[in-house]
Image: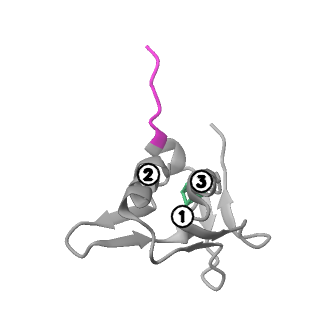
């Protein structure tokens, strides 16, 4: 019998060398909710979180997988600036 590995289990094998001094993704504070919700659904790391009570988008770049999905989907809408983290920082993938 084979054991399936979940996405969460695979992600937990990665290590993240967070660069807290350099924010590599900057957001538009005036983004529309409809555009925000696209990223809430699309980000594979679940970094875009919309709080209905405060009507605010919560985002933390430090767990970013550097996939670029948010850039492709919303550059100029929600994402104001996107670049890779500085060398030696960010995600370090472990395959398997
Ligand atoms: S690059 Fe990918 S993992 Fe990082 S915030 Fe954007 S969608 Fe999420």
**Residue 67, position as x, y percentages in the image:** 64, 51
- State which tag comes first along the sequence, 2 or 1: 2
Spatial CA span between label 3 and label 1: 29 Å
* Figure check: 36 above or below 95: below
The residue pinned by badge 3 equals 14
Quadrant hosting ligand 1:
bottom right
Indicate left or right for 86 with 43 as reference.
Answer: right
* 10 Å crowding of disc 3: few (<14), some (14-19), many (20+): some
Is residue 18 one of those drawn in magenta? no
Q: Residue at x 64, y 86 (%)?
A: 21
The residue pinned by badge 1 equals 77
Q: Element type at marker 3?
A: loop
**Of circles 2 and 1, which is in front?**
1
Q: Residue at x 43, y 13 (%)?
A: 1
Q: Main secondary structure of the magenta part?
A: loop
Residue 19 bears which disc, if any? none
Cβ–Cβ under 8 Å for marks 2 and 3: no
Q: Residue at x 66, y 47 (%)?
A: 94
The residue pinned by badge 2 equals 38
**Residue bounds of the magenta highlight:** 1-7
């Amino acid at each position: 019998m084979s054991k399936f590995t979940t996405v969460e289990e695979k992600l937990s094998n990665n290590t993240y060398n967070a660069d807290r001094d350099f924010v590599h993704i900057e957001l538009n504070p005036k983004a529309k909710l409809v555009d925000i919700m696209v990223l809430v659904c699309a980000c594979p790391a679940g970094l875009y979180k919309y709080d209905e009570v405060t009507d605010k988008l919560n985002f933390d770049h430090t767990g970013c997988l550097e996939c670029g999905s948010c850039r492709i989907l919303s550059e100029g809408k929600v994402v104001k600036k996107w670049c890779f983290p500085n060398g030696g920082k960010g995600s370090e993938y472990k395959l398997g």
